[in-house]
Amino acid sequence: MLQYGFLFCLKTCMIIHELSEMMILEELGMIIGFVIWSFCAVLFFIVGVVDLKSAKPVGFFTGVKPPKITDVKKYNKAVALLWFITGIVFELIGLPFLFLKQNSPAFVFMMLATVALVIVMMVVYLSISRKYEEK
């Protein structure tokens, strides 16, 4: 009887050990996901710094030349601020990577929030370009 109790405990310990390894790998995967997400947010900050230091009007949409601007310095500062704020909000949207379990339905919120962020970013840029555009 003692022998079966020992085997049961040994099997239970092995199962717990395997589960803990799976949980560590799952948590590691979420941390890696957050690091990649943060890298993208850093790229937004880098674009903001480059825009802030630019002497020419900066573009926003790929392949589209920037409009004729009345005050280039203020325009570039406004666009850079847009990129900085986007980077901060993007990083905040990615925080659930640190707390949620893998394949959580809450990740749908993160993706929808990212789509909303991009749409808001475009609307804000259009208002910035209208404000500083030559008439």
Image (spheres, rainbow, N blue to C red):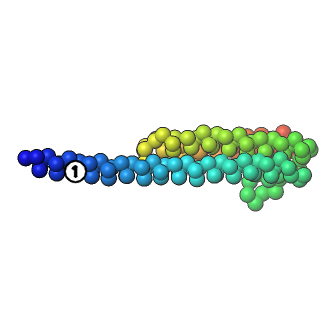
State the residue in front, 48 or 39: 39
Q: Split into 4 quadrants, where in the image is the C terminus?
A: top right
**Tally of marks:** 1
Question: In the visual, does 72 lie left or right of 5?
Answer: right
State the residue in front, 57 or 17: 17
Residue of label 1: 10
Point 90% across, 52% down: residue: 55
Label 1, secondary structure: give it. helix
Q: Picture coordinates of residue 28 (x, y %)?
A: 47, 51
Point 59% across, 45% down: residue: 114
Residue 56 to residue 132: above or below: below
Q: Residue furthest right?
A: 70
Q: Picture coordinates of residue 89 (x, y %)?
A: 64, 39
Q: Picture coordinates of residue 67 (x, y %)?
A: 85, 51
State the residue in front, 13 or 119: 13
Q: Picture coordinates of residue 101 (x, y %)?
A: 43, 44
Question: In the visual, does 104 lie left or right of 95?
Answer: left
Q: Which residue lies furthest to the bottom in this view?
A: 63
